[in-house]
Image (cartoon, rainbow, N blue to C red):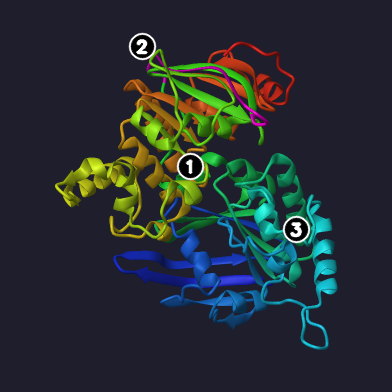
Amino acid sequence: MTDPVLRLEGIVKTFPGVRALDGVSFSVMPGEVHALMGENGAGKSTLMKVLGGIHQPDEGKIYVGDTPAVMSGPLEAKAKGIVFIHQELSLATELSVAENIYLGELPRSSFGRVDWSELYARTDAILKKLNVGFNARTRVGTLSIANQQMVEIARALTVDAKAVIFDEPTASLTDAEKVVLFDVISDLQASGVGIIYISHRMEEIFKITDRISVLRDGQYQGTVNTADTDEEKVTQMMIGRKLDLSRNAAHHELGKVALEVRGLTCGGMYEDISFQIRRGEVVGFYGLVGAGRTEIAETLFGLRDPSAGQILLDGEEVRISSPTDAIAKGISLVPEDRKGQGLVLGMNCRDNMTLPQVDDLKAGPFVAEGAEVAIFDQYRDKLDIRTPGWKQQVGNLSGGNQQKIVIGKWLSMHPNVLIVDEPTRGIDVGSKSEIHKLLRALAAQGYAVMVISSEMPEVLHVSDRIVAMYSGKIMRTFTSEEVTEDSLIQAISGLGGERAA
C-alpha cells in the first residue's frame, strides 16, 4: 500500500488558557485532495502552523513520507516539500510578481548578481500555466486582490512539492479564476502531490476532494470518504449538532422607508441606481465581481463621492461626505476587507469593538474601561467570538473571529441602517447560521439591513428582496417569493429585463 506523503501523529499544542490541539492525527496520500474542516477556533490554523514550523508541538510527530521531520520554520517546511498557500496574503506589494514568487531564492549569475532574465523567464512560464493577465515584471501592488491570490498560488509551482496546503484559496477569486485554480490542483494531483484543502465552502469540498477530516475544539473527529457522506453529516461532525438551515419565517410589519437612493451615479463604477430599504427589511445585493455593489456601499458610508443622485434617510435628503457623517446619521458599514478596513490588528479585541464610540464612553478625560468591557462581553456572547479574553490581540484571532469583531463593533452602535458587505466570508457553517439569524433578528427589531454577498445561498436565505446587478446597473429586483436561482443568474449575467427597484 502506498505510504502517505505527509502524516501527523498525536499533535498537541497548548497556549495559555487554551488547549488548541489535543492529540490530532492526520495523513495525506499522494495524488489526494484531502479537505480539513472545522468551525473557526477548531484548530485548523494552529495545526497548519505546527506543520509549517511557526509553532512547535508540545507532543506528537510529523512525518514527510516515512521520514520523521522537525519543522524549524516555513523555509525548512518548504525545503522538505511542504508548500502553503495562505488565506491572508503575504506579499511584498512594492516588488514585482517575479521577486515575490522567488523571494529568498532569486536565481544568481556566476558573479553572484540576480539573473533577471532567468528570473523573468521562469516566472512567465509559471504564469502561463495559470492563464493570468499579468506578467513577471508587474508590480504586485497594482494587482487586484484576486490576482494577488494567483501570485500566492504560483509560489507552489516553483518547488518539487510533496504536499500543498490551500487555505480558503477561492475567497477572493472570480468563478473563472476558480476554474483555473481547480485545473492547477488537478495537475498537482496527477503528478502525485498531496493536497490539503481548507475551506468553509461545502460545494467546493464535495466537488474536488477525495476525503474529509474534521476537527472540533482541537480534537480529531474522524475522516470520511467524500463520496460516502453529505453536507448534513459533515456539519454534524463539525459542530456536534444538526444545523438549522430553515429561513426565519416569522413575519413582522415593515416600517417606513429608512433609506432611499434615487439615480445615484459614480462615474465608471455604477449608474442611475435607485432603491429603497424599509425598517424591518433585509435587502440583498447580488452580482458578479465588478457589478458595483461594494462601491454603492462605500458611497453610502461617505468613502466615495457620487457624481449624481440623491440619498434620503427617513424621507429627508442628506449629504454624506465622510464616514463620520454616515455614523452620525445612523449608517454603519461592515466592510468586505476586514483586515484593511475593519480592524486595527495590533489592538486588542475590546478596543477594536468600541473604537467608533470612544468619545461616548468617556468618564471625564478617560475612557470608562468597565463600559468598554461590558460592550465587548455582550457581543462576544451574542456572536460566539472565540477568544481567551478581551486582551487578546485581534491579529492573533482566526479570520472568522476577526469578522465577528467587526460585525459586533457596528452592531454595538445600534445603527438605523446596517450595511454588511460579505458578512460571512471566511466564516464556518455554524457561525454563518448564527449571523444569518442575527441579521434577520435585527430586521425584526426595526433595523434596515443591506446585505452584499457573492454567495447565492446566503443572499437567498437572508433577504426579503434581492437587487440583481450587472456592470454597474440594477437589472432586476426580486421578492423572496418570486426569485429563483435561474432567474437570479440570468439577471446578474445581463440577461434579465430591468425592473424598478
Q: Is 172 positioned to the left or the right of 159 in the image?
A: left
Front residue of 449/251: it is 449
- The answer to the question of whether label 1 and label 3 lie on touching residues, with beta carbons closer than 8 A, is no
Front residue of 146/387: it is 146
Q: Is 267 positioned to the left or the right of 160 in the image?
A: left
The residue singled out by tag 2 in the image is: 253
Which residue is pictured at 46% across the width and 39% down the height? 432
| 249 is higher (above) or lower (below) than 141 | above
Q: Residues within 10 Å of mark 1 (few under 14, many from 20)?
A: many
**Location of residue 336 in the rendering, given as x and y in whole percent from the top left corner:** 52, 41
**Location of residue 366 in the rendering, given as x and y in whole percent from the top left corner:** 18, 51
Q: Amino acid at mark 1?
A: Val
| 487 is higher (above) or lower (below) than 330 | above
In the image, the segment drawn in magenta is 249-269
- Mark 1 / mark 3, whichever is N-terminal: 3
Q: Is 12 positioned to the left or the right of 18 in the image?
A: right
- Label disc, if present, on residue 138 of the rendered structure: 3
From this viewpoint, which residue is outermost toward the left?
Answer: 364
Which residue is pictured at 57% across the width and 14% down the height? 501
- Mark 2 / mark 3, whichever is N-terminal: 3
Separation of marks 1 and 3 at Cα, in angstroms: 37 Å
- Label disc, if present, on residue 429 of the rendered structure: 1
Picture quadrant where residue 434 is located: top left
